[in-house]
Image: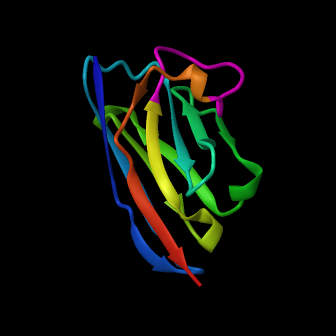
Amino acid sequence: QVQLAESGGGSVQSGGSLNLSCVASGDTDSRNCMAWFRQGPGKEREGVGGINYDGSTAYADSVKGRFTISRDNAKNTLYLQMNNLKPEDTAMYYCAASFGFVKDNILNPVEYEYWGQGTQVSVSV
């Protein structure tokens, strides 16, 4: 089993920045894909960004140019740097990890076996 623990959420004004972190523990294997998903009020869960162990990434169109995903395999940690935040970015943000490499559909939640509890991000106008 793998446990994922997110941190770094908070409340910011529009245009602000936050940096989310997700630490993996337990039966970890860095040869996998990790991703961030979010679910806003009354919305379905959507993929924000994902990164394979080889560094290949994918982003949702809505966050391209504003969010950057990265990982430190030595520290079993996933990051999401969020800049120029907008009110529509308000959501619970979840970290997810897969068993192995994800070739396609990096932003599809069905590719991920392990999930964190989430960290709340709120952006005000």
How would you classify the magenta stretch by its main secondary structure?
A: loop
Magenta span of residues: 97-108
Across and down, in percent, residue 81 comes to: 50, 59
| Farthest right residue in view | 61
Across and down, in percent, residue 121 comes to: 45, 63
In the displayed structure image, the side of residue 70 where residue 42 appears, left or right:
right
In the displayed structure image, the side of residue 113 where residue 47 appears, left or right:
right
Image quarter of residue 90: bottom right
Position of the C terminus, as image quadrant, is bottom right
Image quarter of residue 9: bottom left
Above or below residue 40? Residue 117 is above
Above or below residue 66? Residue 57 is above
Q: Is residue 86 visible?
A: no
The residue sitting at 40% across, 23% down in the picture is 30
Across and down, in percent, residue 8 comes to: 35, 60
Q: Nearer the viewer, residue 58 or 120?
A: 120
76 in the magenta segment: no
Please, which colouring scheme is shown? rainbow
